[in-house]
Amino acid sequence: MKKLQALFLALLILCGTLAPTAKAQEAPPPGQIGVAPSMLELSIGSKPVNESLRLFNLKKTATKVSVEVYNWTLDENNEVKLLPPDEQSLDQWMLINPMSFILEPGKSQVVRLSVRPSVKPAPGEHRAIIYFTEEPVEGAIETEDKPVEILFKLGVGIYAYADDVRRSSSMPAFRFDNKALTLKAPITNSGNVHTRLKGTYSIWEKKHFPGLNNAEKYMKEDDSGKQPQGLVATGQLNQTPVLPGKTRTIITQLPEPRKPGSYIIAVSGELDEKKIEKTFAVSR
């Protein structure tokens, strides 16, 4: 049987929050190719703006990487949708170097980018996505017993802001769906740059819930590795962006408690600097 190649798409454009993590509940996937930072936010005007990204090869073999840049938006399902370029799209103003390279095992590669608007940027947000695609290395020997080769395609979101920036959003309700075990945040963005719900959640046995303030304090200060009595799980709220002029319901999937009982879900977050604090009771 010939070598099977699989494509794993890791869109860092959403800041790694497509699937929020739960502490001590999920193991991270094995490392292959890493990139830092996972997202760039820039202020642009009439002068060039220079930035850089760094790719890391965490594999034991060399890999070939190609680079592409596109204009993009999010569709109704919060999936990335590529758009054709126009005179106001950020991808048309970007110079990237290099556009392809060989990344040796255990090494890193700096990719430099420069934003040079060819016309005056319209006020608000301009977006691009840079795709780093891992390609098969020519000359690799195929064998019957060779494991599946996983090729990575990483997307890094670039957000560029031109004056005047307006941030304005609303969330009429923040709900808990007991049946689906999800948090639902319906957000309307009436500004001209994207917004996102930022924050954390924690799940506690009801009889040991320390109160919202203490739960929030634990989430901010925990670095000891010691878990308080009654704490079941913690994690980040889904930070999928809501683009300008859009209304979306952002859903955070919570982990299922391991045993039946009564629990309290504590949420602490913010939306465009508006603080959000909620608790929900749940029985499983």
Image (cartoon, rainbow, N blue to C red):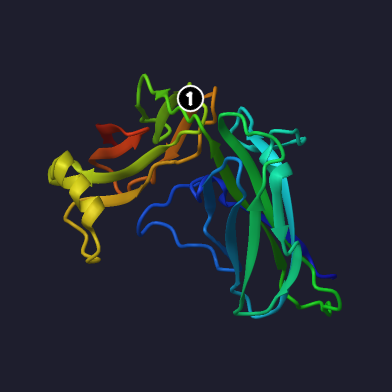
Q: What residue did someone put label 1 on?
A: 191
Please say whether residue 258 is visible from this viewpoint. Answer: no
Residue at left 80%, top 73%?
Answer: 137
Whole-percent x, y for residue 243 in the image: 54, 30
Comparing 124 with 32, the one in front is: 124
Closer-to-camera residue (215/188): 188
Q: Nearer the viewer, residue 195 or 206?
A: 195
Residue most extreme to the top: 172
Residue at left 67%, top 47%?
116
Q: Is 170 situated left or right of 106 in this image? A: left
Q: Position of residue 247 (x, y in %)?
A: 51, 22
Of 48 and 215, the residue lying toward us: 48
**From the viewer's perspective, is 164 left or right of 116?**
left
Location of the C terminus by quadrant is top left
Seen in the picture, residue 165 relative to 46 is either above or below; the reply is above
Image location (x, y in percent) of residue 31: 56, 68
Looking at the rendered structure, the kind of residue marked 1 is: Gly
| Residue in view at x 22 percent, y 66 percent | 224
Taking the image as shown, residue 242 lies to the left or right of residue 63, namely left
Q: Secondary structure beneath disc 1?
A: loop
Horizontal side, residue 171 vs residue 222: left or right:
right
Say whether residue 244 is visible. Answer: yes
